[in-house]
Amino acid sequence: MKRRANPQLSSAGECALALYEQTIRSQEDLTPASVRNYLSDVRHFIAWYEAREAERAGDDLKRRDFDVQAITTPTLTNYRTYLQTTQRQKPASVNRSLISLKRYFGWAIRTHFITYDPAAAVKLVGQEDVAPRHLDDQEEQALLAAVTKRGILRDRVLIILLLHTGLRAREICQLRRDQVKLGKRSGSLEIIGKRNKYREVPLNATARKVLEEYLPTLPPDTVFLFPSGKTKGTLSERALGYIVKRYASSAKLPDVSPHDLRHRFGYRMAEFVPLHRLAQIMGHDSLDTTRLYIQGTKQDLQQAVETIAWT
């Protein structure tokens, strides 16, 4: 069940959320997407709580508006059950909501709005590790054919770099021209990733070739590798997502994002490269994250069991 985009809250609920928003926007180093996700998760919890309390109170009693001090650990475990059973959310989505609430109540403790943390004892939902969503060989070829046939050079370079470097959407959007280092038989991108962590991402022959074609087309005073057509700044993550989706739709590929192209890179590289090297290239802090790329996809597992079929 898809949850509502922006459920209404009581004035008390809106006030509580606004106080939290002010803190995470001004005092924490978070991406705009992370801020939106955290606030959305807390908003949906408050909306669920207020709706439940209103239903319990009935028509004759005053509705109980949100009060952070009234939240207990059982309240949060009941919400977890609601997400799993009524909303039928997948474990990853449930856990994202729970992590957002743990952050929220941790903040409430630090700011002395509450005296104990009801979220501390709440456990996340267990789940099996599965390979991230990515394109298969035919889908990759269809996407490349679409952007080659219908796209401009910039769009082709964007998609090829995503497929051959594994950059995050934010990293490729913020690339500056001076971060590109090209040699005759080698090349690299100087990347400032999550938490301002620096790494160098090597460029293979395919990536170098499209960059050598693309760089001379940029005006001499261009700062960013992919400047915005509307502003003097760089291409936004939203615009990048739209570009990928447009050519994916043309190739009849549903729900393809820039992150899926990063996953495609990781999955292909994991077949040939030791995990510790792949983690270095992709900017992972933990090998546990990189290890997901050696997990079999549904197609891999289907092919595996077919090997013993009685046919």
Image (cartoon, rainbow, N blue to C red):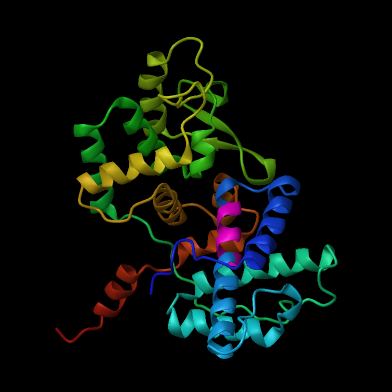
- Give the residue furthest to the front: 60
Residue at image position (20%, 44%) is 250
Between 9 and 283, the residue placed more toward the observer is 9
- 304 part of magenta stretch: no
- 37 part of magenta stretch: yes
Q: Is residue 1 above or below residue 221?
A: below
Q: Is residue 142 above or below residue 58?
A: above
Image quarter for residue 146?
A: top left
* Left-right relation of 173 to 25: left
Image quarter for residue 299?
A: bottom left
* Left-right relation of 211 to 95: left
Give how far across and how far down residue 274 sits, in percent: 54, 55
- Give the residue furthest to the top: 220
Q: Is residue 199 above or below residue 140?
A: above
- Give the residue furthest to the left: 311
Give how far across and how far down residue 271 sits, in percent: 43, 56
* Left-right relation of 165 to 116: left
Give how far across and how far down residue 295 sits, in percent: 45, 68
Q: Is residue 21 above or below residue 281?
A: below
Residue at image position (70%, 80%) is 71
Residue at image position (60%, 71%) is 46
Between 144 and 70, the residue placed more toward the observer is 70
Image quarter for residue 162?
A: top left
Main SS category, magenta section: helix
Q: Give the magenta part as a residue range.
A: 34-42
Give how far across and how far down residue 29 sits, in percent: 70, 46
Residue at image position (46%, 31%) is 235
Number of residue marks:
0
